[in-house]
Image (cartoon, rainbow, N blue to C red):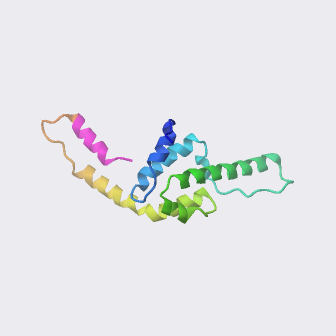
Amino acid sequence: MASFNPLARIHEDNKLTGPNYVDWKRNLTLVLTAAKVHWVLTTEALELPGPDAPYDVRDRATKWHEDDQMAKCYILGSMSNVLQQQHVGMASSMDIMYILRKMFGQQNRSARQIAIKGLVSTKMVEGTPVRNHMLKMMGHVRC
């Protein structure tokens, strides 16, 4: 079924397969931010308090757990089937992202080294427009 929501299209078209971790993470951040659940990736898990706890404490913990489940669904839904099976039983979305960063984060280091090498070694060709040179330099810094 085709979706007309641009964020849903980003989510559907950018499945994590491994080598595309940097692009996938950037697109996932967009989707989670738009869904207003990105905050659970930066907040430690909140224990569900007992029934005698103040309402605001229970409400915040319940909201965290609901938003974490939503974030997990977005994360798992944007992975290849093999990666989904490996991560489906994890406790929180933060745990999933931690493991993925460990699995694929090393690619970030090599990508940064390649980008820095490109930035340092690229020289403007005499007689060409500055615009072309700037576009080439911006291509090295693709984030």
Q: Residue furthest right?
A: 52
Position of residue 103 relative to residue 8, above or below, is below
Q: Is residue 82 left or right of residue 125?
A: right
Q: Is residue 92 left or right of residue 6?
A: right
Image coordinates of residue 60 in percent, x first then y, are: 73, 48
Say how many tags the image has. 0
Measuring 31% from the left and 53% from the top, which residue is drawn there? 115
Q: Nearer the viewer, residue 110 or 74?
A: 74
Q: Is residue 4 left or right of residue 57?
A: left
Judged by its main secondary structure, the magenta piece is: helix
The answer to which of 140 and 26 lies nearer the viewer is: 26
Where residue 56 sits in the image (x, y, percent)?
Answer: 78, 46
| Range shown magenta | 131-143
Tell me, yes or no, whether the highlighted magenta stretch contains residue 22.
Answer: no
Q: Residue at x 58, y 57 (%)?
A: 94
**Residue 25: horizontal and vertical position, in percent?**
47, 51
Q: Quadrant of residue 96?
A: bottom right
Q: Going 48% across and 37% down the picture, which residue do you hit?
A: 6
Residue 30 in percent (x, y) is at 50, 43
Residue sitting farthest toward the left: 127
Q: Residue at x 83, y 49 (%)?
A: 54
